[in-house]
Amino acid sequence: MQIDDLLRPIKTVAIFGHVRPDGDCVGSTLGLYNYICDNYPTIRVKLFLERFPESYKILSRSNETYEIYDDNSNSVDLAFLVDAPSFERIGANGQNCFKSARTTCNIDHHISNKLDLCTHNFVDAKASSACEVLYFLMDPDKISKDTAECLYLGIVHDTGAFKFSCTGQKTMIAIGDLLQKGIDFTRIINETYYTRTYIQTLVTGHVMQSCKLALDGKVVYSYLTPEDMDRYSVTPVELSNVIDTLREVSGTEVAIFLYPVNGEYKISLRSNYVVDVNKVAGFFGGGGHVRAAGGSSKEGPEETILKLLKLIQEQL
């Protein structure tokens, strides 16, 4: 079954990503949205995404998103959940929509996905990104330049510009096909992946300056306090790429970054070769991938880091 098979008999569609959307979430949901708008003009489709980085707004139709779903009176024919492995991770108040939708579809690549969230589930834990999964569900002849640019952005971000181990042969096949659509790949990778705002630069510098090593230099960790967030006037949206800078410390196997969100601490984990951080994140109600995962903790950052280090040490 392909995406077109689901869309042909449909009149209304709602698309949701996960909370605190990253590049892959924005790219995949916007890619699906553009695909439907381009090829199915009679379908009434809405995209619900929480606030995301301004730099991603170079993507087509990015100004047509809704930050919260508040229509509880009418059910949609088809609701998509993209790049999210659980209903707890749905952003923009999407749970209410999925309770009443006539048909649901999950498109994802997280190893922690239980594979039975929706009526239709397209989950490939070996894929680099949700954008890669989505690409192979689409009719390549119906993919416009606008859709291709969305998918390219998502793949770039979840592969770390093609340097992470999740990058595979199918990833590069998809990238090659997307390039043939005439996308402005240089602008996308420069403006959304390699550049930061002034505030992001300052807060990343603070995180790096205060980072510490543990477990004989195999782990690097850092965190922000609520006071730090106020000092830099930064929100969680601006912090999505900090963990990838932290993981660049040479000689380390695992990077840990914590920051406050809604009275808890968001945990971001990355590993290079050995540690399965998805298993570590599972102890904190989270998950993700073998080399990239996250969770949350109600305890303070120092207490949380001590528990994280113990779990990581067991694998090392």
Image: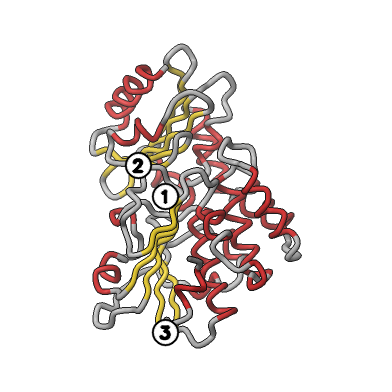
Q: Residue tagged by mark 2?
A: 266
Q: In this view, does 20 lie to the left or right of 177?
A: left
Instruction: Indicate whether 205 appears above or below 90.
Output: above
Residue type at numbered disc 2: Lys
Query: Which one is earlier in the sequence, the residue at label 1 or at label 2?
Result: 1
Q: Residues within 10 Å of mark 3 (few under 14, many from 20)?
A: some
Q: What element carries label 2?
A: strand
Secondary structure at badge 1 equals helix
Q: Left or right: where does residue 283 sit relative to residue 234?
A: left
Q: Is residue 195 rendered to the left or right of residue 5?
A: right
Question: Label 3: which residue?
Answer: 11
Q: What residue type is labelled 1?
A: Pro
Q: Which residue lies at the image location 57% right of the left edge and 66% below the top edge?
A: 138
Query: In the rendered view, would you say 284 is above or below 261?
Result: above
Q: Mark 2 and mark 1 in contact (Cβ < 8 Å)?
A: yes
Tell me the element at label 3. Answer: loop
Image coordinates for residue 52, horizontal then vertical, percent: 48, 59
Residue at the spot 42% in from the left edge and 65% down from the top edge: 49
- Determine whether, in the image, residue 110 is placed left or right of residue 192: left
Label 1, residues with CA under 10 Å away: few <14, some 14-19, many ≥20: some
Name which of mark 3 and mark 2 comes first in the sequence: 3
Distance from label 3 to label 2 (Cα)?
38 Å
Q: Which amino acid does label 3 sit on?
A: Lys
* Residue that appears at 42% across and 84% down: 11
Q: Which mark is residue 177?
A: none
User: Of 155 and 68, which appears nearest the observer?
Assistant: 155
- In three-dimensional space, the C-alpha distance between marks 3 and 1, rounded to whole angstroms, equals 35 Å
> Residue 236: which disc?
1
Give how far across and how far down residue 117 sits, in percent: 31, 57
